[in-house]
Amino acid sequence: MRKFMGLTRRNLLIYFKDVQSVIFSMLTSIIVLALYLLFLKDTFVDSIEGAMQGLKQLVDMADVDMLANGLLLVGILSSAMITVPYNCLVTIVKDRECKIDYDISATPMKRWQIILSYFTASTISSIVMAALLLTVGMGFLASRGELYLTAGSIAAMYGIVLLGAVSSTALFMLVVLFFQSSSASSAFFGMLSAAAGFVIGAYIPISQFSSPVQTFCNLFPASGITVMFRSALLDGLLGHIDQEIGGVDQGMFVESLKEVFSFRTRLFGDELSLNWTVGYVLALVAVCVAAMALIYPKIYKRK
């Protein structure tokens, strides 16, 4: 156990001591924030106002503003939970490229302990960064208005951070195991950063895409994690907006918002409940871990 903890600590230090790596791992989140400040907020607010259909006098515009800010926080969190674990896992590629894996494989550690140390370091890195973003983000939103969060909702969001860290790490470990050079992993990271915002609906709500594209996006666990974040963070606010309307529309306005901003997962044309979304993400984690257990020993051979 001491050897495992030591290797895990070493992998964590490699990530956190490299300031540039930490900054670039947050690149997509920074892009989401910049686009939001430039035009995305206006786009979100216009979409919300367009769904009001004569209810403007009943809905407080401060709540609309808070809803748009909440969608921003979800986009920042979800994109970070894609790029941070990947950036930490690049250590595997660098170790192979520099032949450090020869030294590691020569130690008495079991191969499952070696791969678990990489997995654990990446998961911890993702949890730390996402939890920090979540805490700062909720503090900022609290200074701007009321989110109507309960203690259970707040606890659920930190639980989602844990699930998101584990699921992203499990998926990306399968990817990085096949890279032989840092240049290849960096090229993939560039594509990942560009695509992440679209896959999770940070730039354009996934509901605006065609059904096949929605299915493709929702196959990735990060999309399911984003849906969970939206529900945990914004359901209380949407419930308050529904109370403001007072049943005039029979709840159709809030339902239309949930449809437009993808509060539910759609796969192959069918809508999944939140519980089914959680189950789907957990099933993907199990599949990725099982595949990793089979693939890693064949790639990471003792020298």
Image (cartoon, helix red, strand yellow):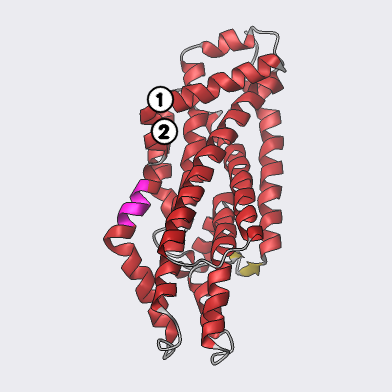
Residue under the point 70% across and 30% down = 293
Q: Label 1, label 2: how many angstroms apart (C-alpha)?
A: 6 Å
Looking at the image, residue 185 sits to the left or right of residue 218; the answer is left
The percent position of residue 97, horizontal first and vertical second, equals 47, 17
**Residue type, label 2:** Val
The one of 240 and 205 positioned closer to us in this rendering: 240
Q: Where is residue 84 in the image (x, y as percent from the top left)?
A: 48, 38
Q: Is residue 33 magenta?
A: yes
Percent of width and height locating residue 225: 58, 53
Q: In this picture, which residue range is highlighted in magenta?
A: 30-35
- Label 1 packing within 10 angstroms: few (<14), some (14-19), many (20+): few
On residue 22, which mark appears?
Answer: 2
Q: Mark 1 points at which residue?
A: 18
Q: Do the residues labelled 1 and 2 touch (CB within 8 Å)?
A: yes
Q: Is residue 75 visible?
A: no
- Of 180 and 253, the residue lying toward us: 253
| Amino acid carrying mark 1 in the image | Asp
Q: Main secondary structure of the magenta part?
A: helix
Query: In this rendering, would 211 be left or right of 183?
Result: right
Query: Does dot 1 land on a helix, a strand or a loop?
Result: loop
